[in-house]
Amino acid sequence: MPPPPPPPPPTAADRGREVRQRLLRAGAELIAERGWSAVSTRAVAERAKTAQGLVHYHFASLGALLRQAALGGVEALFDELTTLLKTAATSQQALDRVLGALDAYSGTDPTSLLFTETYLAAARDEELKDGLAGILAGARDALADHLGDQGVPQPQETAVVLLAAVDGLMLHRPTSPALTSAAVGPVLRRLFTEANPGGGTV
Amino acid sequence: MPPPPPPPPPTAADRGREVRQRLLRAGAELIAERGWSAVSTRAVAERAKTAQGLVHYHFASLGALLRQAALGGVEALFDELTTLLKTAATSQQALDRVLGALDAYSGTDPTSLLFTETYLAAARDEELKDGLAGILAGARDALADHLGDQGVPQPQETAVVLLAAVDGLMLHRPTSPALTSAAVGPVLRRLFTEANPGGGTV
DNA sequence: ATTCGCCTTGGTCGAACGCCCAAGGCGGGC
DNA sequence: GCCCGCCTTGGGCGTTCGACCAAGGCGAAT
């Protein structure tokens, strides 16, 4: 068999695109490590192993870079979650996996922190809020569909509360060691059933 | 009736204490407005109407000021919540009030943002994490006691999840306008009853 | 009247910040 | 062979940062 043709050498535009990706990845990492407003152009450039002047060549401002980096990271995880829901053998297994994914995020890992930082920054940045709302709408609807298929009442409202509760758990986890998935799993599952009159009277 | 004796003139120590309080209040406000790592000594001093050199006279560092300001704010609200639980005519009314308090916080108000910023900063600051954990333990236990009195199963775990869920809702609220208390209240109340086998099958 | 301790002022230090730009490298189309 | 457009470099602009300090104010104690 003939050897595969060697890949064409990357053009200048190709290399530029790759630098862009490195800058975005470095930005997302640093948001998680230091917090949104403690990320500097020089730190991003150093992490991405580029000259610091490149930041303002590829992006209009540091804020624009951070917005794009954060939204990209959030969208990637939501896409993964949606795929998990769609490819699972049964819907029940899918939701089990989603709840089980709680263990993958400790509240101090880069993904958890990026999520929390992004939601928080969106409260102060209209443009970020709009972008995040769009991404969130897709994930919320996909989750609500599956909840509805399972007979969960008020699937839209339940999906919204479930997503918020998971982020709240990530936010509290570093401070509350009791928040293991074994402890909270049974309680969270109560969200999937109608309130039982035989239970609490609140 | 004799006029009340005039209050003694404030001593230098009194005035110093008052400046401390102003600095702490200014610090808490600015954490909410700008985000933890975007608060500067000069901004705190200006908001507190003091000279900027006072910040490092009264506090060892900017970080120490912010830690104390944040923990003070968090503790104040948790004390208020605990009082609400203890002074209500009935326990049921108390929990209704707590859930109703959801409407008081929009996710963009200073209190909500201070809470979220503090939890997030605690993930990166061991000292802050310890202080926050202590305050949280008291509030959690008080809430768990009342949940237990109401017959809610697993009151400790439910209290932890409920507190986390409320903070998660505050975090999501600016992005998800659907998170009104009318929409999420009924879903949240499911947390108070044992999972009903007749409901969702997840 | 003098001393003492606490608080306050205003300015300064070196470092880091966001953003900008002149100048150069370099491969693809004419 | 030349030019054009895109990418890249390294340095520099003015500003703001956290921290620090010499000097003074002032009531309480002696």
Image (cartoon, coloured by chain):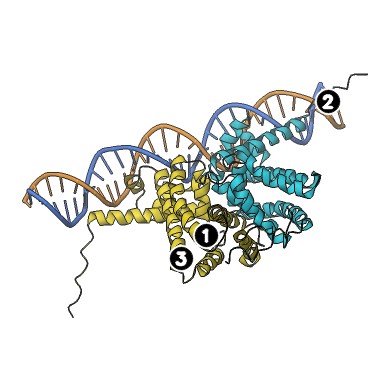
Chain colours: A yellow, B cyan, C blue, D orange
- Along the viewing direction, whichever of B84 and A55 lies nearer the viewer: B84
Residue at (65, 51) in percent of width and height:
B128
- Which residue in the protein does label 2 denote? B8
- Which residue in the protein does label 1 denote? A148
Q: How many labels, in total?
A: 3
- Are discs 1 and 2 less than 8 Å apart at CB? no
Residue at (64, 66) in percent of width and height:
B197
Given the image, what chain letter belongs to the residue carrying mark 2?
B
- Which residue in the protein does label 3 denote? A84
Element under disc 3: helix
Hey, what amino acid is under mark 2?
Pro
Q: Quadrant of the C terminus of chain B?
A: bottom right
Element under disc 1: helix
Q: For mark 2, does the 10 Å Cα neighbourhood hold few (<14), some (14 to 19), or many (20 or more) residues?
A: few
- Along the viewing direction, whichever of D13 and D17 lies nearer the viewer: D17
Residue at (47, 62) in percent of width and height:
A81
Do marks 1 and 2 share a subunit?
no
In the image, taking residue A128 as reference, residue D6 lies left or right, namely: left
- Find the distance from the CA under tag 1 to the CA under tag 2: 68 Å
Q: Residue B119 location in percent, x, y?
A: 61, 51
Hey, what amino acid is under mark 3?
Leu
- Find the distance from the CA under tag 3 to the CA under tag 2: 69 Å
Residue at (54, 64) in percent of width and height:
A150
- Are discs 1 and 3 less than 8 Å apart at CB? no
Front of the two marks 1 and 3: 1
Given the image, what chain letter belongs to the residue carrying mark 3?
A
Residue B117 shows up from this direction: no
- Are discs 3 and 2 less than 8 Å apart at CB? no
Residue A202 lies, with reference to residue A96, above or below; the image says: above
